[in-house]
Every structure is written in C-alpha cells, then in structure tokens.
Image: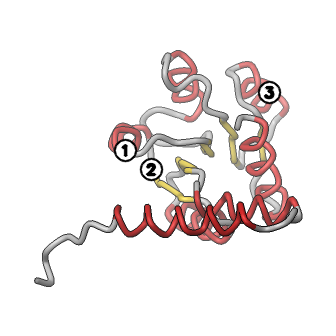
C-alpha cells in the first residue's frame, strides 16, 4: 500500500469548489486577500534556470514562500524535462550557465513559438551595461543583478505575472 500512488485530483477539485463557493458568498473582500486566495487556487509556475545549486534552492524557497510552484533546471539540458511536464508562467535565468549560456538559451526560447511569450528575467552576477543591454535586446523583461534584494525579486515576479495574466 505504501508504494501505491494516491490520486487526489477529485479531492482537490472538491476543495477548490467549496472554497470558491465560500469566497463567492462573501461580501467584498480586500484585493490583497483576493489575490492570496487566487494564488492558492491557481498557483503560478516559475522556472528557475541556475547552475549554482545553493542559489537555485534559495530562489526556490523564496518563491515558494510567496505561494508559487517552482521548477528547477541546472542548465539548458534539463530544460526540456521540466517544460515537457510543467507549463511555466515565468522564467528566472542566470547568464553564466554551462554548455549553453543564458543569452544563447534566451534566444532559443524567444525563437520558439510556444515559449516566446513567457516572461523572462535574468538574475545574474554579470552586470556590465553591455550584458544588461544584450539581455533586453534578446527580449528579457527585466534584469536583476546578483547578489539580489529578495524584495525586489518578489516584486518583479509578482508584477510580471500580473501584467501577463
């Protein structure tokens, strides 16, 4: 019994239905409360492409504390496994990736018909004006320099997800 996978879709559907009914029956709720409830019912999926494991896990903790589902890839070779299983709503990516750097990977993503509209944010230690300019030329929606401010990362993710909803 321990190894048998439990299907909870019907339970999750019932919980969502009950929650939505209760929310609908309430009087006007504050916008922040509504956003929090919506985030729990329909969590956005963030893909973090970062070769440094410590940074990858730190970003995962930060994003999941905000209610996002976070998928991880260490480099471009792991990307297809993540994208095949999980459609994503936003991508956070380092520039200094092995094998295929972040700029090259961004170009491939922006050239792909199904992936080009996903918001892309570079989070990188490379912070020259030339690097930042190149990122925006490739279609990045923002560029956050490492070490980054956690609140700035949260705000950037939240803003881009709301703009692309």
Task: Identify the residue under disc 3.
Answer: 130
In the rendered picture of this protein, how many numbered marks are placed on residues?
3
Mark pair 2, 1: CA separation: 5 Å
Query: Residue 150, position in %: x, y?
Result: 78, 64
Callout 2 touching callout 1 (CB < 8 Å): yes
Asked if residue 98 is positioned above or below residue 141 in the image, the reply reads below
The reply to whether callout 3 and callout 2 are in contact (CB within 8 Å) is no
Q: Quadrant of residue 140?
A: top right
Query: Which numbered tag is attached to residue 125?
Result: none
**Whether residue 57 is situated above or below residue 47 in the rendered picture:** below
Foreground residue among 83 and 35: 35
Circle 1 packing at 10 Å, graded few (<14), some (14-19), many (20+), is: few
Q: Is residue 112 left or right of residue 131?
A: left
First-in-chain label (1 vs 3): 1
From the image, tell me which residue sits under label 2.
Answer: 73
Left or right of 92? Residue 17 is left
Q: Residue at x 89, y 64 (%)?
A: 30
Which tag is nearer the camera, tag 3 or tag 2? 2
Q: Could you say which disc has been placed on residue 78 in the image?
A: 1
Residue 74 position in % (x across, y down): 45, 51
């Amino acid at each position: 019994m321990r190894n048998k996978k439990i299907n909870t879709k019907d339970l999750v559907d019932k919980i969502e239905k009950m929650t939505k009914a209760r929310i609908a029956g309430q009087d006007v709720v504050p916008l922040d409360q509504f956003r929090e409830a919506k985030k729990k019912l329909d969590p956005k999926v963030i893909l973090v492409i970062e070769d440094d494991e410590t940074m990858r896990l730190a970003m995962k903790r930060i994003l999941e504390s905000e209610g996002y589902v976070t998928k991880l890839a260490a480099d471009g070779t792991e990307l297809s496994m993540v994208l095949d299983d999980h459609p994503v709503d936003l991508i956070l990516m380092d520039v200094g990736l092995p094998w295929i750097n972040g700029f090259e990977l961004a170009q491939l993503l922006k050239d792909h018909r199904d992936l080009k509209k996903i918001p892309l944010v570079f989070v990188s230690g490379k912070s020259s004006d030339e690097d930042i300019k190149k990122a925006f030329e490739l279609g990045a929606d923002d560029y956050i320099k490492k070490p980054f401010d956690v609140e700035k990362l949260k705000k950037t993710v939240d803003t881009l997800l709301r703009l692309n909803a």
